[in-house]
Amino acid sequence: MNNMHVLLQLVTLLAALAIFAKLEPRINKMGPHCRISIRVAIVLTLAGALWLALAITQGYQPGGHVAVLVLGLAIWLWSDKRSRRFR
């Protein structure tokens, strides 16, 4: 395993954990009138982030495209202005 694979694993793992840290509190803050599509999207994103983090800890080597996608989603979630009300 070369340094690039280790770097991709580290970046992707941290981004997946950042996604989980940002979305998990939102589940508890959803009101009863929240659309089901939003609930399903958040639960599926959480499940995907946890699944990816677990796979990486077991040796999965994500490609560059996966790292870029997950990192982009993590940055988007943490910089979204509307999400500041959930802090």
Image: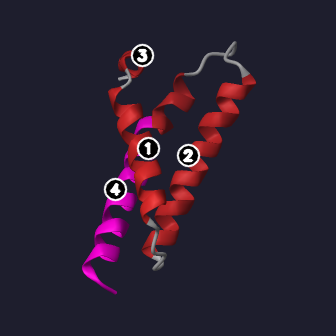
CB within 8 Å, label 2 to label 1: yes
What range is drawn magenta here? 1-22
Q: CA distance from mark 2 to mark 3?
A: 19 Å
At x 50%, y 29%, the residue is 26
CB within 8 Å, label 2 to label 4: no
Which residue was labeled with disc 1? 19
Percent coordinates x, y for residue 48 in the rendering? 58, 53
| Label placed on residue 82 | 3
| Label placed on residue 14 | 4
CB within 8 Å, label 2 to label 3: no
Percent coordinates x, y for residue 10 in the rendering? 31, 65
Label located before the other in sequence (2 or 4): 4
**Placement of 16 over or under 86, stated as above or below:** below
| Label placed on residue 46 | 2
Residue type marked 4: Leu
Label located before the other in sequence (2 or 3): 2
Label located before the other in sequence (3 or 4): 4
For label 2, the crowd category at 10 Å Cα-Cα, with few meaning under 14, some 14 to 19 and many 20 or more, is: many
Label located before the other in sequence (2 or 1): 1
Q: Is residue 11 left or right of residue 54?
A: left
